[in-house]
Image (cartoon, grey):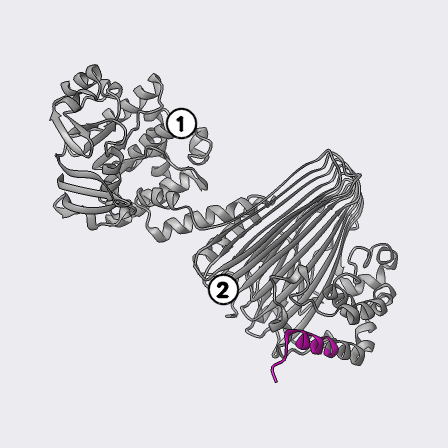
Amino acid sequence: MHMSEVDILEDVKVELIDVYKNNSTLINANVGPQVNNVRKKALSDFNRIGIPDKKNEAYKYTNIEPFFKGDYISEFSIDKFFKLNLKDIFRCDVPELDTYVVLLLNGFHYPNNIEVLPDNIIVCGFAEASIRYPEIFKKYYSQSADSSVDGLVALNTLFAQDGIFIYIPENTVLKKPVQIINLCYSFKNLRIFRRNLIIADENSQANIVVCDHTLCSRGYLTNSLTELYANKNSFVDYSKIQNENSISTQISNTFIQQEANSNVTTNTISLHGGLIRNNVFVKLNAGGCESNTYGIFLCDGHQHVASFIYVKHDKPHCRSNQLFKGILSDSATGAFNGKIYVSKDAQKTEAFQRNNNILLSDEAKMNSKPHLEIYADDVKCSHGATIGQLDNEALFYLRSRGISEKEAKQLLMYAFANEIITKIKVDYLKKRITDLVEKRLRGELSRCNECNIRCG
Amino acid sequence: MLEIKDLRVSIEGKEILKGINLKVNAGEVHAIMGPNGSGKSTLASVLVGRDHIEITGGTVSYMGDNLLEIAPEVRAGRGIFLGFQYPVEIPGVTMVNFLKTAINEQRKFNNLKPISATDFLKIMREKQELVGLHSRLTNRSVNEGFSGGEKKKNEIFQMAMLEPKLAILDETDSGLDIDALKIVANGVNKLKNKDNATIVITHYQRLLGYIIPDFVHILYKGKIVKSSGKELAVELEKKGYDWLNEE
């Protein structure tokens, strides 16, 4: 008998709950009490909500069922992977950037010799931090990621074991970016849960770059959740580069809370992946904040990239920008669901949202849903979405100057993507990402440039 | 260099050009004049290879080859240049990147090595001066935020950079003030030599006070109804286009 989507997701839910119950001792073993204390609620939330199906409005255009029903195993002990020598399997030219590099292997912090950070800045594994800094965890952990609303948030909270922890103390500037490299490498298809906690305290400044790689052709089902707290007057720039193989799935949730006069920019660059779902929730809790949420995705084959953005203005005089762009070819599909919510008290809000997409083939498909919900009467808000082809007039103009059709298309696609890349504030990172996007558009990138591993 | 014989062209089923004959030799400047809707821009479009145009009859040969079978970028590689009536804005493609790519694609087509960065910058500075294009514009995206006059100057600047054999300037004078007009004309005159040719398409005689054509053709209702020396332009300016109906 053919099973319906709902039945399959119900089965997966039951299986995951079993997996948790059978391994809870191991899962609970190496983390602090704050992480374990919320699991009970997460379990009941997950049991109640389950995995979102297409009837769920937020997942209407992202069918995650085929990716969840796959044959995955879970590993809850970091020891399983540490027999690997990362230096043997991984050489990436991104670390040549002048950054503090932190490695994660299959979601577990991989101790590398990170330089000692100045000014009491903390960059370490999530598990380690949850034991060493219980006060910080008490104050922040799981405060913005509400497991009662989203089953996948509940699932991450239930399985949370490791990830990255960053704390920038007040009046401190992180001089070089922290670069988090997420690697997936295993002999079997694997479920990965990553949990990150980032806190920028008052008057601090930080640049964070996240790179996601799959190092082999196994399928990965990654559920990644990051909570980012930007306290008063802090300034955070957070870029994420996703480059995974075509049979991997990544569900990424980013929760951002901003206090007075803080400024947070996120830039998500989705180069490659089977199914990528990026949810970004921004909550502006006090006046004078600026929030910029940017993203570019490039997808072909049967890839699917979806961005779900929710920016909530709770207080007056804040400003937010959402700008997402996509280039889709072959049978790729994409979705953008962006929301600006302005509560009654949030007068003088300036909130803008734009989503532009280019379809390069007849089969490619894009769903875009811009959405404003405004309860204040003195605001400046706008939204807009376009889905189109490359500009034929521009294409002809370039060709009339001797540029071949292929090259002209490259130039136009790159120009389209460039609007997002120019938003990246660190120059050498901008240059590096420019190269990666150019290579991707030329079809020369299925992996990061210098990496030795030939992954999917 | 260019020979058009009995060219007939339709757009969306409507015949626009009804048997054009024109011969252009190296070293010559031709002016094609005519009222709106006479088919001037359609002729330019045919020569650079726009694809919404249906050629229903006649031939166009360029340097001995059937031009109509050649792709637009190859035409450019072989020395054909169009100064657009309405240059498009291309956000995100910088002028420098655009010109460098264009020059190198044309060089590649002609089996030449890519231009060196220093040579490129040198030529760019030189030509910028020639047409009086401010460097603040060459640092921008192609035509983005340019005024009408700046866009036209930019067309002449590109022509200077690419050094075409056959340049077709489609209404390059429209919307220009007299200073800009002089600069554009000056650019064209300086680039003129015995090996290249220019076709100036215009509505008004104004530009022809600065670019002296060897031949003037009047295009009217899809046909060249009169061809003569430069004096024809003056006559046209005096009488307007209405007298053509009477003849």
Secondary structure mostly seen in magenta is helix
Q: Nearer the viewer, residue A307 or A200?
A: A307
State the quadrant of the N terminus of chain B: top left
Q: From where the camera sits, is residue A405 visible?
A: yes
| Above-or-below relation of A32 to A344 | below
The chain containing the residue under callout 1 comes to B
Q: Which of A112 and A283 is in front in this view?
A: A283
Residue A106 location (% of width, % of height): 66, 70
User: In the rendered view, does B245 fall on the left or right side of B81?
Assistant: left
Does the magenta segment cover residue A207?
no
Magenta residues, start to end: A1-15
User: In the rendered view, does A171 fall on the left or right side of B197?
Assistant: right
Q: Label 2: which residue?
A: A446
Instruction: Name the amino acid type tagged 2.
Output: Ser
Q: Which residue in the rendered view is the most extreme toward the bottom?
A: A1
Q: From where the camera sits, is residue A96 visible?
A: no
Question: Residue at point 67% right, 57% down?
Answer: A279
Q: Which residue in the rendered view is the most extreme toward the front?
A: B246
| Above-or-below relation of A56 to A66 | above
Q: In which quadrant of the rendered view does residue A18 lie?
A: bottom right
Q: What element carries label 2?
A: loop
Q: Do the residues labelled 1 and 2 touch (CB within 8 Å)?
A: no
Residue A102 location (% of width, % of height): 68, 60
Q: Label 1: which residue?
A: B148
Question: Residue at point 69% right, 59% down?
Answer: A253
Q: Is mark 1 on a helix, strand or loop?
A: helix
Instruction: Name the amino acid type tagged 1.
Output: Gly
Q: Which residue in the rendered view is the most extreme toward the top?
A: B238
Does the magenta segment cover residue A2?
yes
State the quadrant of the C terminus of chain B: top left
| Above-or-below relation of B198 to A55 | above
